[in-house]
Amino acid sequence: MKTIILGPPGTGKTTTLLNLVDEFIQKGVRPRQIGYFSFTRKAAKEAAERAAKKFELDIDNDLENFRTLHSFAFQRLGMTREKMMSPSDYKEFGKKCNIPIKTAKYSNEDGTFNSDNEYLTIIETARVKQMDLLEYYDSRQNILDIERNTLYLLSEELKRFKKEKGKKDFTDLIVEYTQGSFKNAFDVLFIDEAQDLSSLQWDMVRKMWDETEKTYIAGDDDQAIFKWAGADVDHFIALKSEVDKIEVLEQSYRIPGGPIHELSQRIISKVQNRFDKQYKPRTEEGILKRYSDLTQVNMSEGQWLVLATANYLLDDVKELCELRGWYYQYKDKNSIDIKLLMALQNWEQWRKGSELTHIEVKNIYGYLGTNVADGFREGKLFSSDDKYTLKECQEKYGLQTDKVWYDSFEGLDTFTENYIRNMRANGEKINANPRIKMSTIHGAKGGEANKVLILQDLTNAALETFSHDPDELHRLFYTGTTRTKKELHIVDPKNFNKAYIL
């Protein structure tokens, strides 16, 4: 029995799978006989933690098959980290072949390959697509700035390098698993985010479901935005002729009704090859606003997700946030280190008479420099059982100032000081999660916010890619517009020749 569960944005496809897991365990299916595989480690971990909590199970033993496909192959093949290609191995390979490689690694999150070297990226993408390397190159040579012969030679040299070192990569693991003879014998198999699986990963899934009584495959072809990295959404769509049942989750708990839902539907209706499905938005009507210039957007309040098709397009947004004193996160890094912000906040409280813990005092001392006497700067004399006043630290623990933070903290450059002043003047909340987060649309998949801002400009490379596959571009902007829970803000492009007009 094979079932496809189609989950449009915010309809809760992962929650639906987790509820099914609960039902099977309640019916007596042993947790170790459930295979739950997700595209990301985070999602697989979430499923395991929920089942473990509800049924008092041990994650490592009872739920050992709640994993990514790469992790499962790693386990079944008896691999160790020492046997896997590391970033340092790729750097060594680059040095040997006289090609610059600064970044080359497989993500621990989903097993995808990330590299700043185009040759390595093309080699890897061809492998997960199960395409001949040179045929894949020929299909994309119009947008590649690399040499055909060099690409082939590097591919062969990489094979020799791995063999000599006795190392494998994550793609090797999937290949070896599919070629091996492993008995899984799952009673139930769950595959989440199926639209993101590559052709090679589908081979692995098919190998597992051949011996499984019940299989549930969840995904949304409309949000398939990783085709450029090897995802095979056409394979997912073609499954409709093989499965026994197709279920569509029809209620979105994220997308508001009105203009936002209407816009997203206009975009996705342009896709030629897709599952035909409808879903209901929330009854609350959303707000759609357009701007001719980024400076017109007021992000002084609320939770925001700022999206673009490329990271460099977010530079103007970062500059605007810094000018206005808005606290933001970019590439999972906060615009100001949280330890510094906490030190500033605690310092002001300290000056007003508050007592601080030894950890808070040590953190402050780390920014005071010569305003703490020699021998006291490490804060080693403080007791974990006590709290301290500013006056006490002046008298006993080497503190030599009680001025405002910008006169007491040393080592802050003018830009950082002015930015923090603007943040404090605007009343920005000091915590580990800034209310403004910036990302590419690809990086934000699965995320959501009350307010979403989209920049429409594209890179030349992206335009060239999408000209051969417009469906991919439609899906990309559909995914972007469906991240919002309340408001969608769109900045008109500076260059209409490099834009997808929403």
Image (cartoon, grey):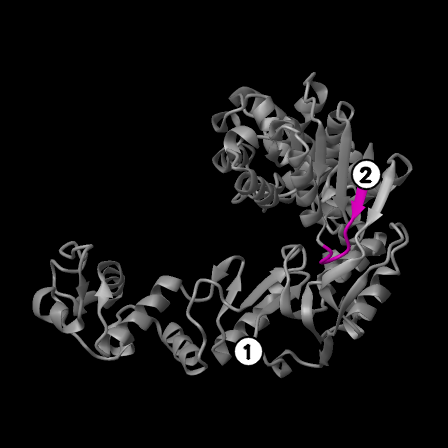
Whole-percent x, y for residue 3 in the image: 81, 38
- Please state if 33 lies on the left or on the right of 380 as rendered: right
Magenta stretch bounds: 3-11
Residue 426 visible? yes
The residue lying at 78 percent from left, 65 percent from top is 281
Residue 458 visible? no
User: Residue 123 appears in which quarter of the rendering?
Assistant: top right
How many angstroms separate mark 1 from mark 2 (CA)?
43 Å
Look at label 2 and name its amino acid: Thr
- Please state if 468 lies on the left or on the right of 442 as rendered: right
The residue lying at 71 percent from left, 58 percent from top is 10
Q: Which badge, 1 or 2, comes first in the chain's sequence?
A: 2
Q: Which of the two residues, 303 or 201, is positioned nearer the viewer here? A: 303
Residue 333 position (above or below residue 61)? below
Is residue 10 rendered magenta in the image?
A: yes
User: Residue 175 appears in which quarter of the rendering?
Assistant: top right
Q: Which residue bears the numbered disc 1?
A: 301
Q: Which residue bears the numbered disc 2?
A: 3
